[in-house]
Every structure is written in structure tokens, then in C-alpha cells.
Image (cartoon, helix red, strand yellow):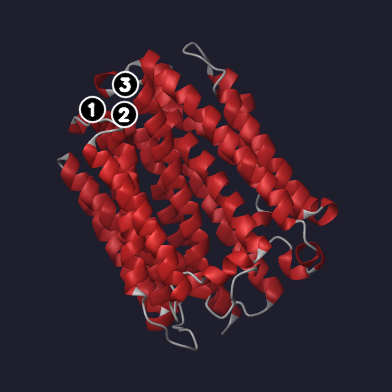
Amino acid sequence: MTTRRRNLTLLTVALATFMTYLDNNIVNVAIPDIRVSLHLGAAGLEWVVSAYVLVFAGLLLVGGRMADAFGRRRLLVLGLLVFTSSSLAAGLAGSATELIAARAVQGLGAAMVTPTTLAIIAVTYPDTKERARAVAIWSAIGALALAVGPLLGGVLSQHASWSWIFFVNVPVGAVTTALARTVVTESTAEETRSLDLPGLSLSAAGLTALTWALIEGGSRGWTSAPILVAFALAVGGLTAFAAVEARSAEPMVDVALFRDRVFSGGIVALMLWAFGLFGIYFFTSLYLQDVLRFSPTEAGLAFVPLAASLIVGAGVSESLATRYGAYRVVGGALLAMGAGTASVALLGANAHLADLMPSFVVIGLAAGLTTPLTSSVLSAMPAQRAGVASGVFNASRELAGLLGITVIGAIIAIRAPGSQAFSPGAFLSGYRLGLLVAGALVAAGGVAAYVSLRSPRVEESPEYVLVG
């Protein structure tokens, strides 16, 4: 493959990554406008975000399996078509049901696209150093989406309409699809594996039940029969999933991977990182607009220093990890990120933009410094199954982000039940407690990273240096 074609392939998967990552956070700043336009309550509002993340995370692993089995370019193109058409449907939605359904289909498209991106990079760049640079670009694109998303969402929702946060995906999706059909070379795994339908069904059922219970518990009552049944189904489904995967000849998730200290500890740290970051983006957007009375554009601008600091942190993380060890850098960064998250809880109803900036910069810089965690987790996965490996990595992050939104939302619902959900005083009480919980969990991720990454295999092998 020529250098030009490799570069165009990288551009294609970078655009696909940008589009799916952008949709994870562009919605957040527009949430208040969507709430008013479609007359949504607290639970309905969470479903606008969670419907996308739930389907996205729940199907990432099967998306990786399908990419390996049926062709990575083929699944990339199909996923882009699904994502682009459902984005158009979301923009045209006239009711909460239509929007949530369209968001779920967007999640399906993203679950097809995302696992193929890392897998295509892996086969396009067989040289280790070239692959490291390509994955670093892939990671930088995700960070750029974090920076652009809230600002773009704020500008579009304030000066046009919230529908445009979905319409913007249509031209980008069309261009990316055309590139994928033209420049990406088809590839499949050397060995074909089944889709593990029992594992897929049990994991999807367990995650759906858990998410539904966490979102609806505040309005229905945490001890009501439907909520208790949903929690029981979640525990039963996820327990059965683990048992089925342990006995399956071709599991969707190879349970044996979790015996590796780097892999298991790294995944735990990654999930706690995502728990904090996703929860911060979603609920801080409501805090800025509903409590501090920022306009959507001002709220979007408030997130820019956080995302810019994240990019800076990611840029220096390689040299710091090489000098001091990935376990020290990542572990310390997560501790700092947890402290920064908790410090936002000290702010009240009269805070100004300047009051937010120290905490936001600490959170962003620390989040960026955790970048070496990515290479450690990916390197611990089987290289011969690139699609599934990418799926495991992304699914862990997305599932934790989903839990961050739903758990913090559940805490807010306890402090601000029913019609009080958007009362500034009641919301602020729950928001503060939610941030303290998120901060503690992120800090615990720092301990997990320090212990798990402190391994000669990670510190001495060049393969485990930062790749994005």
C-alpha cells in the first residue's frame, strides 16, 4: 500500500472517529433546549444521552467480532450509513420518543464504526513505530472532539436550533463514507469466529436493565417493584454473561484476559476515568445553564479550557511516562483528576467562569496525562483479533461513561425528586454529592493504575510506550 493511500485511510478513520466521539458530547450543552422544546423530564433527558451510549457500548464487542469476520471496510461503510441516516432522523424528531429512538440507532451505527477504526489502523500500519504515530493521531482526534463538541453544540443550539447538532453529521458522514469506499482496503481476521449470540443477548439485557433502573429509580421509587425487578435482572443477566463467557469456546470477551494484571487493572482505571469525565460533561452543562445561568454558547466556551488542557496533557504524557514510568504518571494523574472533580463541588450558585477554570484545567490536564494507559491496555490484548481488541477497549470506556451519567443522575434524583429535578437549589445539592462520589472513584482508579501498570513488562518494553 502506498504512503498516500495509508494517509488517506488514516484520514478516513480519523473522520469517522471524530464524528462518533463528537456525538458523545455535542448533545450535552444543548440538553436544556431539548428539554424545553420536547417537554422532557429528568429521566427522559437522561435517555436522550443514555440511549445512544447504551446501544453503542452494548454492541461494541459484537461490532468488533463482525468486523473481524465479515470485513472491516464493509462494516465501516455500513456503520457510517446507519449513523448518518439516523443523525438526520434525530434532527427531524418532533417528540421525545422519536429522538430517543433515533439516538439508539445512532448508537448502533457508532458500534459498527468505532471497532473498525483501530482495527483498520492495525492492518494498515504493520510497522510498530508507524502504527504508534497513527494511533496517536487517532487519540488526538478524539480529544479534539471533546474540545469542539460543547462549543459547537452551544453555538448551534443558541443561534440556530438544537436539531443542527445532529444535522451537522450528515455532510461529514457522506464525505467519510465516500472516502471509506474509495481508499480503505478490505481486511478480515485470519480465523472466523461465531458472533456469540448468548453472550450478546445476556450482556445487552443486563446493561439495559441496569440503566433503566438507575434512570427511572428517582421517579418510580428505589424500592418499587419495577425497579427492584430491573436490578435483579441486571445482576442475573451480567452474572450469567460472565458464566457463559467463561465456558464458551469462542467467547465475546475472553475472561482469561482479566488474569493479566496490566489488562484488568488498566481496564478498571480506564473505566473510572470515563465515569468521572462523562458525568462531568453531562451534568456540569446543566449546572452552568440552569444554576449559573450561562447561555449555551457560554457553557460551550467554558469547556474549551478543559479540553485544551486535556490535549496539552496528552502531548507531554509520552515524555513524562518514559522518564518517570507510566504507572507513576497515570496513577498520579487520576488522583489529581479526582481531586479536581471533587473541587468543583465546592462551587455554589454564585460562581463565575473564573472560579471554574482552576478545577477545569486540573481535570483536563490530568485526563490528558492518563494517555499512556491506552497503550498499556491495548498492548495486553490479542493482536490477532484487532476488531475485538478495539471493541473491548472502547466498550469499557463507554460503559463506564454510561454509568457515570446514570449513577450521578440517580444521586441527583434522590436529592431532587420529581418536579424538583431542575430546581437550582435541589439540583445543586445532588450535583455536589455526585461530583464527590465521582471524584472518589476516579482517585481509586489512580490507585488501580499505579498497582497494575507497575510491571517490568510495561516499563521495559518499547511496545508499551505511548501509542495514543
Q: Is residue 96 above or below residue 414?
A: below
Q: Nearer the viewer, residue 405 or 375?
A: 405
Would residue 173 be visible to someone looking at this image?
no
Q: Nearer the viewer, residue 159 or 21?
A: 21
The quadrant of the rendering that contains the N terminus is bottom right
Q: Is residue 273 above or below residue 155?
A: below
Q: Position of residue 308 (x, y in %)?
A: 60, 40
For badge 3, the amino acid type reads Phe
For badge 1, the amino acid type reads Val
Q: Is residue 331 above or below residue 322?
A: above
Residue at the far top: name it.
350
Mark 1 → mark 2, Cα distance in angstroms: 6 Å
Residue that mark 3 sits on: 422
Q: Position of residue 291 (x, y in %)?
A: 40, 17
First-in-chain label (2 vs 3): 2
**Secondary element type, mark 3:** helix
**Secondary element type, mark 1:** helix
For badge 2, the amino acid type reads Pro
**Callout 2: few (<14), some (14-19), or many (20+) C-alpha neighbours within 10 Å?**
many
**Secondary element type, mark 2:** helix
Residue that mark 1 sits on: 36
Q: Position of residue 13 (x, y in %)?
A: 48, 66
Please tell me in which quadrant of the rendered image residue 172 appears.
Answer: bottom left
Residue that mark 2 sits on: 32
Q: Residue at x 31, y 29 (%)?
A: 32
Q: Nearer the viewer, residue 81 or 239?
A: 239
Q: Are marks 1 and 2 in contact (CB under 8 Å)?
A: yes
Q: Are marks 2 and 3 in contact (CB under 8 Å)?
A: no
Q: Are marks 3 and 1 in contact (CB under 8 Å)?
A: no
Q: Residue at x 29, y 18 (%)?
A: 420
Q: Residue at x 30, y 30 (%)?
A: 218
Q: Position of residue 383 (x, y in %)?
A: 59, 77
